[in-house]
Image (spheres, helix red, strand yellow):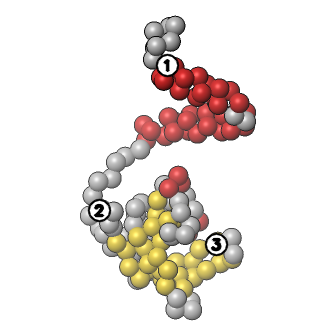
Amino acid sequence: MSSDGSSLRGGSVGLVRRSRDRHAPRSSRVSQIRSDIDLQTRLPDLKVVDQPPTDAGKVFFGAWVELEDEAGENRTYRIVGGDETDARGGWISVDSPLARVLLKKQVGEAVTAQLPGGEVHLTIVSVRYQP
């Protein structure tokens, strides 16, 4: 036990955390505070989606979308929140240029997207919803 009555282990963990936080780069702490504020601002507008949409052939948040390009090559993307993106896994932000073009479109529709590499023409091959 420490002199203030807390266990030494719990007290030392708190001291280590405070010391580490105090020595973290200021820009890192500021960035974390901004992230926390952004999340708190967004929470009231968030909606839990626990089942697929009634029109499962259309592209909405959480969809796995298979696309075919002009060369006949297929790629699959999942539309996720901005904090869930994973380029290797094909998880793209709902706010990305490609996702914005795909939203509310359906299987068989052709879309044109302005991407960083230029304009691309794609056809929606399939849409599915799964965890």
**CA distance separating discs 3 and 2:** 28 Å
**CA distance separating discs 3 and 1:** 58 Å
> In the rendered structure, which disc, 3 or 2, sits on the residue that comes first in sequence?
2
Q: Name the residue rendered at 33%, 53% in the picture.
A: 49
The residue under label 3 is 114
List the single residue furthest toward the front. Answer: 1
> Which element is circle 3 on?
strand
Tell which tag, 3 or 2, sits nearer the viewer.
Answer: 2
List the single residue furthest toward the right. Answer: 26
The residue under label 1 is 8
The residue under label 2 is 52
Tell which tag, 3 or 1, sits nearer the viewer.
Answer: 1
Amino acid bearing label 2: Pro
> In the rendered structure, which disc, 3 or 1, sits on the residue that comes first in sequence?
1
List the single residue furthest toward the bottom. Answer: 71
Picture coordinates of residue 89, whole percent (x, y): 50, 69
Tell which tag, 2 or 1, sits nearer the viewer.
Answer: 1
Where residue 18 sits, quadrant-wise, is top right
Q: Vertically, is 65 above or below 42?
A: below
Amino acid bearing label 1: Leu
Closer to us: 24 or 49: 24
Marks 3,1: beta carbons within 8 A: no
Quarter of the image for the C terminus: give it: bottom left
Closer to us: 24 or 48: 24
> In the rendered structure, which disc, 2 or 1, sits on the residue that comes first in sequence?
1
